[in-house]
Image: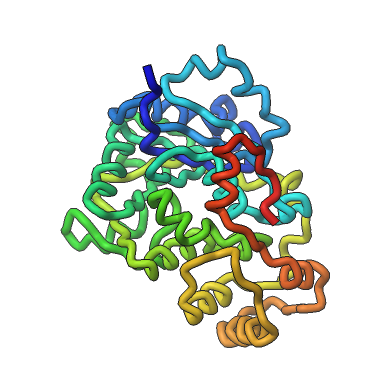
Amino acid sequence: MPKPKIKISVIVQTARLDFPILKRPDLHLFAPTLRTLESQTFPHKEFELILSDSRWEQRKGMFSSNEQLDAFTFPIKHIPVYSKWKDMGYWHAQANVNQGLIEADGELIILSGDCGEFPPNSLQKFWDLYQEGYFASAFVNYIAVGSTIEREMLNSTRPDHRYQFLKGENRWFPMGQQVFGYNSYSMDAILECNGADELFDGDKALGDCDTAMRLERASYKHIMDKDLAIYEHHHYGIPKEILFGKQYECWKYNYSLIILSDLHKRIRANDYTLSDEDMTFMRTQAENMEINWKFNWDNPIAKFWKENPPLFNLKELREKRLNGERITYRW
């Protein structure tokens, strides 16, 4: 009997320590996601979980045996992340996304943070909105520190500030720059846009907004529904063993990069280089925003960033994986 087609790939991007949840030293960071995905109403053989893990080397034994995998009713892929930024100790969230996309088999991609809990109808809701022609983004509510997601605890959560934009309606259609966190898009659409832009790596901010804006330029529509929300535990940040680079030596400003991408009307990522004019524009934008950091384009990391742009074709890399090749570094 043939295997059911995978309709949804949930990609969790993570680089945290095993027990980062505040006041819950007993709760592993994957536990809330694993437990609540087991409760999904969506058919369990039609979705997969991909853990795109920057600490894979330390956790590679967690899902390495058939016995461990058989404990779950849905497929799990636990994969390492390959990124030059990771190797140098800098932020590399877009690399986590692209590594997951290469390994994904789903028609619909749901991007997830770690430490998140999915109410039982979440995947079905993402899928239903996709069938209507939209890419859904979930509201993200933070669970009170030390709590669980028991029904009586929901009133003690910190709600997503974007609820205000519903204005009494059931749905809201955000602009790309308002889309972040737990998002979705089709595999075909994200391959058309050539994945998450790894030029945003090296720094933390705005990569997910850039992806949503490029999808918007390609005529795809985002939606948020009042009944689609994820509950995330408060947690500690990324450990120094991952972010050992000099994070606070300011050598670029991702907000100016996202403005530049908008000016160029870019749809595809990872297929362009920055000109000297682009670099000057970004610095001017940062200065106009009165950023107090001192920019230093002579910083070796800044030079590396400009001289080593990510250039690759994600669709071709994924096809190589489907043909049995192991894909590591993309550039």
Q: Position of residue 54 (x, y in %)?
A: 66, 42
Using the image, determine if residue 92 lies above or below residue 205: above
Q: Position of residue 181 (x, y in %)?
A: 45, 52
The front one of 316 and 69 is: 316
> Which residue shows up at 72% across the image and 46% down it?
242
Specify the quadrant of the image occupied by residue 327. top right
> Which residue shows up at 72% across the image and 55% down it?
85
> Which residue shows up at 40% across the image and 60% down it?
179
Label tally: 0
Q: Position of residue 27 (x, y in %)?
A: 54, 27
Q: Is residue 239 visible?
A: yes
**In this picture, residue 299 sits left or right of residue 154:** right
Query: Furthest-top residue in view?
Result: 67
**In this picture, residue 128 sits left or right of residue 220:** left
Using the image, determine if residue 233 lies above or below residue 137: above
- Image quarter (top left, top right, bottom left or bottom right) of the N terminus: top left
Q: Is residue 203 visible?
A: no
The front one of 224 and 234 is: 224
The front one of 164 and 224 is: 224
The front one of 196 and 155 is: 196
> Which residue shows up at 45% across the image and 55% down it?
190
Specify the quadrant of the image occupied by residue 165. bottom left
